[in-house]
Image: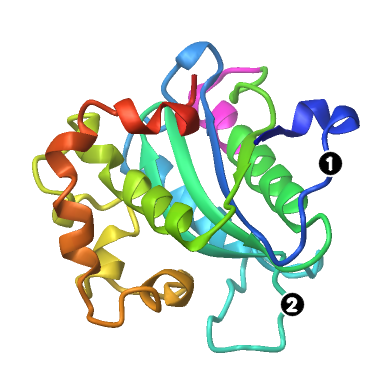
Amino acid sequence: MVYDIDMARRQPALVTGEIYHVFNRGVEKRKIFLGDWDYKHFLESSTHYQIFDKKLSRKYPLNPKNTSHQKLVEILSYSLMPNHFHLLLKQTIDNGISTFMGRVQNSFTKYFNIKNDRVGHLFQGAFKAVRIENDEQLVHVSRYIHLNPLVSKMTENIKNYRWSSYPIYIGKGNNEVISTKDILDLFPGGDYERFVLDQADYARSLEQLKHITLD
């Protein structure tokens, strides 16, 4: 079931301990990432706003080794595209995802508007979320997220796409904030890379993934 935070009065609350595919795009399908600094700012904000403590200053970013900080969410995977983003989030406290997404999107909108001398909304609503019902759905959605840059023709090799968590999953990227355990524990043989790439050609059609796309 798709959860649209703008329809909160008609939908059940997001459940603590559960995993959700969270996504959004620019209003009127406009680009929200215009260059490297925009992608970097979004990722830095996502790192910072994982923490529940409102007093945590941006001058002192999250130390992943500091377990005393209570997190709103765990970020399992992500992919950032020019006009939209995909996140796989586990809610760790009540209202964690809603609070996290509100902070990230509001912060990014302010940054984007100041930088580009514009006003108004940047995102198409608050966000949408699909609850992950089982392990099979979890791994398929993670694969969908990681294949998104390839399907959208942003890269010919997803190992080299910098704005995705895929390099982290195959041991080719630095991991400071991504929680890979939930997914990689389902691949005891260490064949997650094969699992993703085996479906690369088929995924280009997106026929089996229409229920979790942005439209």
Residue at far top of view = 28
Q: Secondary structure at mark 1?
A: loop
Question: Mark 2 belongs to which amino acid?
Answer: Gln
Q: Residue at x 71, y 48 (%)?
A: 103
Where does the image place residue 123, in percent across and percent down from the top left? 60, 25
Q: Give whichever of 4, 188 is nearer the camera.
A: 188
Q: Secondary structure at mark 2?
A: loop
Q: Which residues are magenta?
A: 111-119
Where does the image place residue 137, in percent across and percent down from the top left? 46, 52
Q: Would you say 19 lies left or right of 94 here?
A: left
Q: Give whichever of 141, 97 is nearer the camera.
A: 141
Q: Which mark is residue 70?
A: 2
Q: Disc 1 designates what residue? A: 12
CB of mark 2 within 8 Å of CB of mark 1? no
Question: Mark 1 belongs to which amino acid?
Answer: Pro
Q: Residue at x 21, y 50 (%)?
A: 161
